[in-house]
Amino acid sequence: MDSAAHTVALLLADARLPSGGHAFSAGVEPAIQGGLARHDVGAFLQARARTTTLVDAATAVVARRAGLIGAPYGPIERAWAARTPSRAARTASTDLGRGLLRLAQRLWPQSPAIAALTAGDALSPPRPIVLGAVAAHTGLDAETLVRVAVYDDMAGGVAALLKLEPGDPLDGVRLVINACAAVDPLISQLAALDSPEAIPAASAPQAEAWTEDHAVTNRRLFRA
């Protein structure tokens, strides 16, 4: 990657990016409302990294390739949706995608990869597909894209935890490091994916149930 792509990678991993990520808890708020103890959040994040986050990261990789070669995003979105059973989780991802897409359209209005996200009758794409299109346009390599996708989800979850169950922020740093490490052995494999069919199907039934319950409560700080 060139220096500009490295800068984009840092921006995408920055919680201060104005794309709406601050309103997302990466499943941590639903889990805590569902009864998860604070001392189990580390295990929860590691499990999420190997399931829900892994599916999103793989989807972003395949979307990146589609953006590079001009292939349609529709089949990738359908594959992602089939691997994301929770409607509430899909809706939250679409909301996040809308925020990131707005940013991408403002920064790179002439990008074919980004313009294709809303071509024809396309609806608002989920965040991993927008992330993949941004990677295609800005020159992020596939392994960096996987690392950004995983880090963003884990760091977002820990940031939410500090608001929901305040504690020492230094402990949160360790949670992020351990959760990201849980995916390290899979990064090269994920980065090599090249078709919607290759996206792993790694579900998290309990987390999905918590997310569905969370979607109908009026006592929440985060979108999901």
Image (cartoon, rainbow, N blue to C red):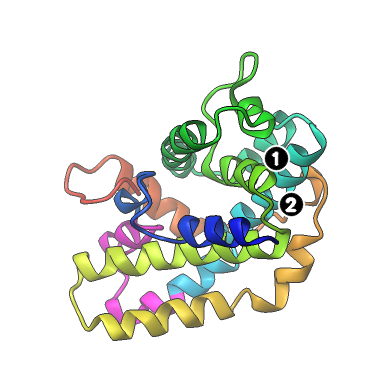
The answer to whether 109 is drawn above or below residue 214 in the figure is: above
Q: Main secondary structure of the magenta part?
A: helix
Decide if residue 205 is on the left or right side of residue 166: right
Amino acid at the residue labelled 2: Ile
Please say if the residues under marks 1 and 2 sit with CB atoms less than 8 Å apart: yes
- Toward the top, the furthest residue is 120
* Location of the N terminus (image quadrant): bottom right
Image coordinates for residue 194, horizontal then vertical, percent: 82, 49
Question: In the drawing, does residue 67 fall left or right of residue 148?
Answer: right
Query: Is 29 in the magenta?
Result: yes
Q: Which residues fall within the magenta stretch? A: 25-43
Q: Name the residue under label 2.
A: 199
Which one is nearer the viewer's eye here, 138 or 47? 138
- The answer, for residue 115, to whether it is visible in the render is yes
Q: Residue 128 magenta-drawn?
A: no
Q: N-terminal of the two: label 1 or label 2?
A: 1
Of the pair 24 and 81, the residue shown nearer to us: 24
Tell me the crowding category of disc 2: few under 14, some 14 to 19, or many 20 or more residues within 10 angstroms, Cα based.
many
Say left or right for 196 vs 101.
right
Tell me residue 64's x, y (percent). 71, 46
**What amino acid does circle 1 point to?**
Ala
